[in-house]
Amino acid sequence: MTSTSTAAQRARPHAAPAWVALALACACQFMVILDASIVNVALPSIRGDLGFTPTGLAWVVNGYLLTFGGFMLLGGRAIDLFGPRRMLVAGLLLFSASSLAGGLATAPEVLVAARVAQGVGAAMLAPATLAVINTRFTEEHARARAFGAWSAAGGVGGMAGAVAGGSLTTGLSWRWIFLINVPIGAVLIVVAMMSLTGARTRRRESLDLTGAVTGTAGLAALIYGVMQSADHSWTSVAVVGPALAGLLLLGVFTVVEARFATQPIMPLRLFRIRGVAVGSGLLLLFGAIAIAMWYFTSLFLQNVLGFSALQAGLGQTPAAVTFMVIARWAAALLPRTGARTLVLAGCGCFLAGFGWLAQAHADSGYVTSVLGPTLLIAVGIGLTFPTLMAAATADVPEGDAGIVGGLAQTASQVGGSVGLAVLATAAGAGAATAAGGSSPAAALAAGYDLVFLMAAGLGLAIAVVSLLLPRHGRG
């Protein structure tokens, strides 16, 4: 055996069949996305049992999202330094242990701390799943199909959140939305230990502590400031202070990475890869598209058409199923069409679907005014999301797979957080403007219609920027 083949074997972290590694990555992605939404339906029960204040209750959701988005880059680089297997197992251990603590919590502070720790675990898991796919699936067609399955798993997690949360809370207790993660996590840890060999990383670099601190703190502060806009005006100290601090810290982070770090946590050379630079920017815009579709459509169903939370989740199920089917189909097409063609087709669906959805009002029917356009938008999401993830992580050295996966998911997460804050402000302003001579439901409908029109505009922006993507291939 040659030294080259021996080195290749040592560099490859996978010994199990490809489908086992893919199933593991998909299951972890499903769990991460599920836990971002499953608690929403259970919040009233949690508040009653633990005595949360209204402000404190929001941190059951925000604590998870804040650390999930803030620690993603750090988690991604740690994967490159210590290997996907170690970080996947460590992430699963932390995620499962914090889920157990959350399920057994007897005080608000304990539950919020558990959710914060869950978010850190998720920030380790999410880029690790992408690193597994990028290092295990190197052939273009196989890699595209793997991204399709991974995207579909996330879609299932998002779709199952409301239904599973409602079912567990009603049938058992809100505690089971956390406790259910413990046996699932234990099984996934065993699978990871058996299917991923302990890869020896080719580098023995020290972690860039200055970059880790400034980058993580900058992202967390920025996301926190944006979250504060739900309760304060955009010009208030509560929003501007942390957001500005976050931007300043991210500026320091960029300078440190460019000039001072000998082993940067985020090597800026990666942005010379066109797919990484353009794909990450597009994922930033796409995060707001996803929020407009899933979050604000759910609000329209509940606040305008009078659906319950569980009914709204079921009402979005056809769109979620459509997304999963199209994502798998788009993955098969990607090697033949290239990223640009699929993204442009998806943006056409965004323009048509959101334009149609923006015509909905308080007297609209579900089938003609919500189901139809959301199916069309779901086709667009299925065409664009796995394509952008594949483009943003393609042609990257194996030793940088973790940080690029973290960057891609951070872009989508930050885009979603900022998009939620901006679109919620627009919805409130639109509803206030229409409130004068309208019923409350009609005023809310006007606010959501404005959001949908803005989402159509985002679809157009994505289409324009996507022209910078390569026409064919992965690079």
Image (tube, rainbow, N blue to C red):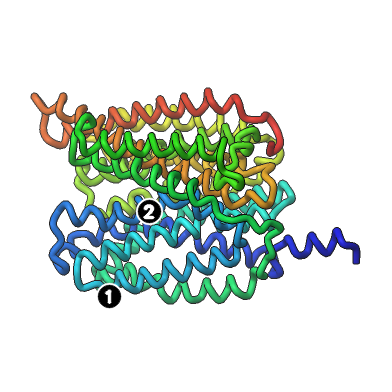
Q: Secondary structure at mark 2?
A: helix
Q: Quadrant of the C terminus?
A: top right
Q: Earlier in the sequence, mark 1 or mark 2?
A: 2
Q: Quadrant of the N terminus?
A: bottom right
**Residue furthest out toward the right:** 1
Q: Which mark is residue 150?
A: none
- Residue designated by label 1: 104
Give amino acid for label 1.
Leu
Mark nearer the viewer, 1 or 2: 2
Residue 154 coordinates in the image, percent (x, y): 48, 54
Left of 163 or right of it: where is 467? right
Real-space Cα separation, disc 1 to disc 2, in angstroms: 21 Å
Give amino acid for label 2.
Thr
Residue 301, image quadrant: top left
Tell me the residue at 67%/29% (across/down): 471
- Taking the image as drawn, is residue 361 in sight? no
Residue 79 coordinates in the image, percent (x, y): 58, 57
Could you say which is closer to the camera, residue 344 or residue 308? 344
Q: Secondary structure at mark 1?
A: loop
Residue 330 coordinates in the image, percent (x, y): 60, 43
Could you say which is closer to the camera, residue 336 or residue 9? 9
Left of 141 or right of it: where is 46? left
- Residue designated by label 2: 67
- On screen, residue 316 above or below 202: above
Left of 456 or right of it: where is 304? left
- Taking the image as drawn, is residue 426 in sight? yes
Tell me the residue at 35%/37% (across/down): 418
Left of 54 or right of it: where is 351? right
**Residue furthest out toward the front:** 260
**Residue furthest out toward the left:** 436
Query: 10 Å neighbourhood of mark 2: few (<14), some, or many (≥20)?
Result: many
